[in-house]
């Protein structure tokens, strides 16, 4: 036997799904907000400037976030579901205990 078998993995299986260099879901939400500003509010100078700001600075910020971590929004959503502390349990089958939310200082 020559050693462990090696199988090549195509890069498209590990590359994150990005749209224009930013997270796909956030880009679509940003585009929906821009369309709502343009077509919902109307073609006023204020809505046009706000939509232009979202289209340029918003997408720029989303691209910078995706460059730092391509799954940043999913990780943040998972993070806010965590509790501050988890009580010790007697066994795996023990019922979940209620944790009082911490009071901000």
Image (cartoon, grey):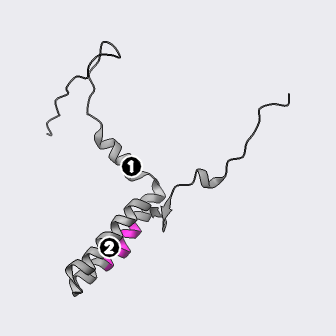
Where residue 40 sits: x, y (%)?
A: 22, 78
Query: Residue sitting at 25 percent across and 23 percent down?
Result: 96
Q: Does the magenta stretch include residue 21?
A: no
The mark that comes first in sequence, 1 or 2, is 2
Residue at the outermost right position: 1
Query: Residue sitting at 26 percent across and 29 percent down?
Result: 85
Where residue 31 sits: x, y (%)?
A: 35, 71
- Return the residue at label 1: 74
Q: In this view, does 8 lie to the left or right of 26?
A: right
Q: Do the residues labelled 1 and 2 touch (CB within 8 Å)?
A: no
Residue 69 vertical position relative to residue 41 in the rendered view, above or below = above
Neighbours of disc 1 within 10 Å: few (<14), some (14-19), many (20+): few
The residue mark sitting in front, 1 or 2, is: 1
Q: In this view, does 49 lie to the left or right of 9?
A: left
Between 47 and 38, the one lying in front of the other is 38
- Return the residue at label 2: 54
Mark sitting on residue 93 = none
Q: Which element is circle 2 on?
A: helix
Q: Which element is circle 1 on?
A: helix
Work out which quarter of the rendered image holds the N terminus and state it: top right
Q: What stretch is highlighted in magenta?
A: 52-61
Work out which quarter of the rendered image holds the C terminus and state it: top left
């Amino acid at each position: 036997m020559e050693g462990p078998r090696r199988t090549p993995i195509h890069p498209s299986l590990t590359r994150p799904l990005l749209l224009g260099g930013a997270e796909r879901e956030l880009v679509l939400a940003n585009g929906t907000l821009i369309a709502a500003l343009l077509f919902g509010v109307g073609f006023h100078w204020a809505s046009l400037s706000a939509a232009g700001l979202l289209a340029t600075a918003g997408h720029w910020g989303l691209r910078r976030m995706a460059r730092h971590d391509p799954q940043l929004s999913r990780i943040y959503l998972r993070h806010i579901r965590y509790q501050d502390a988890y009580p010790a349990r007697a066994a795996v089958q023990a019922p979940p205990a209620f944790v009082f939310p911490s009071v901000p200082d």
